Image: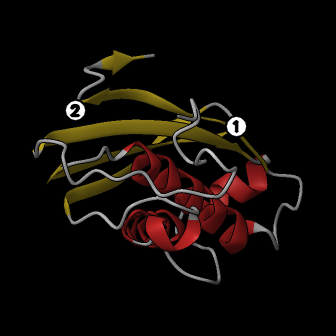
Amino acid sequence: MSKLTHVDNKGNANMVDVSNKNVTSRYARASGYIFMNEEAKKTVEEHSNKKGDVLTIAQVGGIMGAKKTSDLIPLSHNISLTNAKVFFESVDGGYKCISEVKCEGQTGVEMEALTAVSVALLTVYDMVKAVDKRMIIKDIHLEEKSGGKSGDFKF
């Protein structure tokens, strides 16, 4: 038997069979940052960006990203999410994006939380790029997760 869960004994791609796993409450929290120049941050804070309310639209984009994770990440399971939140905190030179995702299921929601942050930050970039093309997205990572066989994790 292969030690890699997404590859079978013959080297073929393999979606992990979760049918024998117990349904448990699953939770994941992820975060990442976007850094931008002062002018770009000012347009976000003052809601003066020509494309609209940047952070609200990015929140919606992040939630949509969480819901579409199985369409984006090969071999990931289509999960029925019970909750997905995306929010931003202002930091020096930009914003921290945080996502929290939940489900009752047989597999975790880490990828959904990470995808939510990624899409939200890319949405900010897309909406503000006319003001600052040198924005930097960085440090996207899983902060914590709970539920499932592997138990709890905190970064």
Q: Residue at x 61, y 44 (%)?
A: 9
Give the residue pinned by disc 2: 148
Which element carries disc 2, helix, strand or loop? loop
Rendered position, 148 above or below 77: above
Give the residue pinned by disc 1: 93
Q: Residue furthest bottom?
A: 51
* Residue 127 rendering spot, x and y as whole percentages: 66, 73
Which comes before the other along the chain, label 1 or label 2?
1
Q: Residue at x 31, y 29 (%)?
A: 145
Quadrant, the C terminus: top left
Rendered position, 92 above or below 10: above
Q: Residue furthest right?
A: 134
* Residue 129 rendering spot, x and y as whole percentages: 79, 68
Q: Residue at x 46, y 67 (%)?
A: 70
* Residue 75 rendering spot, x and y as whole percentages: 52, 61
Camera-side residue: 25 or 42?
A: 25
Rendered position, 138 above or below 127: above
Which element carries disc 1, helix, strand or loop? loop
Q: Amino acid at mark 2?
A: Gly
Circle nearer the viewer, 1 or 2: 2
Rendered position, 16 above or below 74: above
Q: Amino acid at mark 1?
A: Gly
Camera-side residue: 4 or 74?
A: 4
* Residue 46 rendering spot, x and y as whole percentages: 54, 63
Camera-side residue: 25 or 130?
A: 25
The Cα–Cα distance between marks 1 and 2, rounded to whole angstroms, is 37 Å
